[in-house]
Image: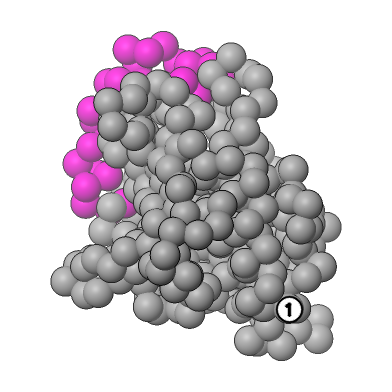
Amino acid sequence: MTERPIILGIVGDSAAGKTTLTRGIAQVLGSDDVTIICTDDYHRYDRQQRAEMGISALNPDCNYLDIIQQHLTLLRTGQPILKPIYNHTTGAFDPPEYIKPAKFVIVEGLLGYSTRGMRDNYDVKVYLAPPETLRASWKINRDTRKRGYSEAEVREQLKKRESDSEDFIRPQRQWADVIVSFYPPGEQSDQDELLLNVRLVLRPTIPHPEFSDLLGPKTGQLASAVRLELDRDMGKPVDVLEVDAHATAEQVIELERMLCNEVPYLGKFCSLEGNPIIGKLIGTTGETLQSYPLALTQLLITYHVLKAAKIHQ
């Protein structure tokens, strides 16, 4: 490869929305140009062994962090890896997969930022932090529909894993460049997968788009659904972008235009008519839903990935 791959990290607790976010970003970048790696494949023990040992998959001791780090280093230099595969349906391991990195590599999972060596391999680091009540609802829906668990079993698992979530997963938030929190607006039920606001904490660890126009007079389509404000995160100043649940397709197109106009080389990834493949998610009954706050989030993260690609050309 004449250019090294650009690596995007997406980390968060179980059922925090990592796969949904990853899928949309990969579609925008183009599936042929994206390699997706799930760090959950690097579990040290299968489901039966974990149950016998009383250890959860969230515990670093239950994962080959050293091999994740080694594989990230290889991928960053354009070299292939032999990646393990953990089967979430059977709870066992399938034969490993030979993978060559594409132009972009998305690494999603539970413990992607656990070591300094792992963190040093990412160009952009995203952390997903939905409210715990919403994440629990997502996990119950997913695990009962797709993984064969009862609701009682999922709730018991959440309870048992809480200490590991607090000790090992949430501390990784501190290393992220962008923190994504989908949440229900006002008194809206958190069961509604469409009506979710999103709060994006934009840390100054990477350059962000020029959103200063949003701070000025209320003009354009975006103003009614998108706000930019200053806040503090872990004691340091940050920009916070808020997108309302009722954001529309027209507002997605306007943000897309803003990003494309700011960085001309993004042009081939932009469509001023809007990009219909982003913002899609699967509802609780299997239907395809459209979330414009999700679409705006996927666009923003894609922008960062492409900007990193330009910087490292």
Provide residue 55's location: percent of width, then percent of height.
Answer: 30, 39
Does the magenta stretch mainly form a helix, a strand or a loop?
A: helix
In this figure, which residue is indicated by the disc labeled 1? 264
- Image position, residue 191 (x, y; %): 40, 21
| Residue 37 visible to the viewer | no
Identified by mark 1, the residue type is: Pro
Residue 88 figure quarter: top right
From this view, report whether residue 7 is shown above or below residue 282: below
Q: Is residue 212 left or right of residue 287?
A: left
Q: Is residue 186 left or right of residue 46?
A: left
Rendered view: 153 above or below 45: above
Above or below, 199 relative to 17: below
Q: Residue at x 44, y 23 (%)?
A: 192
Residue 129 image point, x, y percent: 35, 48
On whether residue 154 falls in the magenta region, the answer is: yes
Quarter placement of the N terminus: bottom right
**Residue at 22%, 74% in the rendered image:** 236
- The residue sitting at the left extreme is 235
Residue 16: image quadrant is: top left
Give the side of residue 84 with respect to residue 62, left or right.
Answer: right
Image position of 182 with respect to 39: above or below? above
Q: Position of residue 197 (x, y in %)?
A: 41, 41
**150 vs 223, nearest the viewer:** 223
* Residue at screen point 28% across, 32% down: 186
Q: How dense is the environment of label 1, judged by Cα within 10 Å: few (below 14), some, or many (20 and up)? A: few
Mark 1 falls on what kind of element? helix
Q: As rendered, which of 298 and 52 lies closer to the eye? A: 298
Instruction: Decide whether residue 245 is among the magenta residues.
Output: no
Q: Quadrant of the image for the C terminus?
A: bottom right
What span is in magenta? Answer: 141-169
